[in-house]
Amino acid sequence: MQIGEERRHGEEKETPPLMALNHVSRVCRSVEKSVDFYTKVLGFVLIERPESFDFDGAWLFNYGVGIHLVHSKDEEKLPRDKDRLDPMDNHISFQCESMEEMEKKLKEMGVKYMKRTVGEEEGAPIDQLFFKDPDGFMVEICNCENLKLVPQHSISKIKLPSNKHNPPLDLGGQGDDAAANAAG
């Protein structure tokens, strides 16, 4: 397929050789304040980054994903509204084993947050906590494992790492063969 060429609806394309999300990059006003937030509030661990990087930043890792912090001198790259909590805004989300413990931690750390529950009508309630990091980037904590993944088509293209927590997968009667392909 040429660049710019549109794919016809329903036309299958080979899945890229991706494995998992590696990291999320965040620009920040203060690398130190952001490291403090992500380590103390979310439990990330500061790790070494290549010495060849000649700019202020830090790498954090935990839960199978990294957060790369990069100091920004350009205020235009940072969120303007650091206080408004809008679940429809861009955000990163982390699944949580205990929403009560996480809410307690946010209170203890003095982090302003919004709490809500969605999906009660469907019988699979999802609890959510929304808050912002020191630079105004939204973070969500949820118990999203209650939400089933229901593929609209192409179940065989879903790759689920076998050594990680995965949400339940509703195969809609597509059988064990499809689940085995998705897992491996």
Image (cartoon, rainbow, N blue to C red):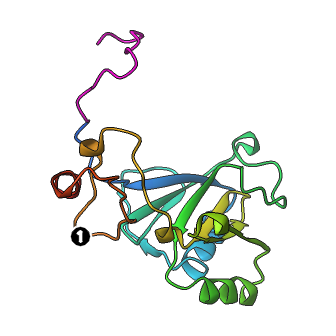
Q: Nearer the viewer, residue 126 or 67?
A: 126
Magenta span of residues = 1-15
> For mark 1, what is the residue?
163
Majority SS type along the magenta span: loop
Q: Residue 50: percent from the left, percent from the top?
A: 35, 57
Three-letter code, disc 1: Asn
Q: Does residue 171 sit above or below 9 in this rendering?
A: below
| Residue at x 49%, y 82% (from the top left corner) | 97
| Residue at x 50%, y 70% (from the top left corner) | 146
| Residue at x 35%, y 23% (from the top left corner) | 10
Q: Residue 79: percent from the left, percent from the top?
A: 75, 49
Q: Does residue 113 sit above or below 74 in this rendering?
A: below
Q: Residue 17: percent from the left, percent from the top?
A: 22, 40
- Where's the C terminus, which quadrant? bottom left
Residue sticking out furthest to the front: 173
Q: Where is residue 111, by image quadrant?
A: bottom right
Q: Is residue 6 magenta?
A: yes
Q: Secondary structure at mark 1?
A: loop
Q: Nearer the viewer, residue 146 or 137?
A: 146
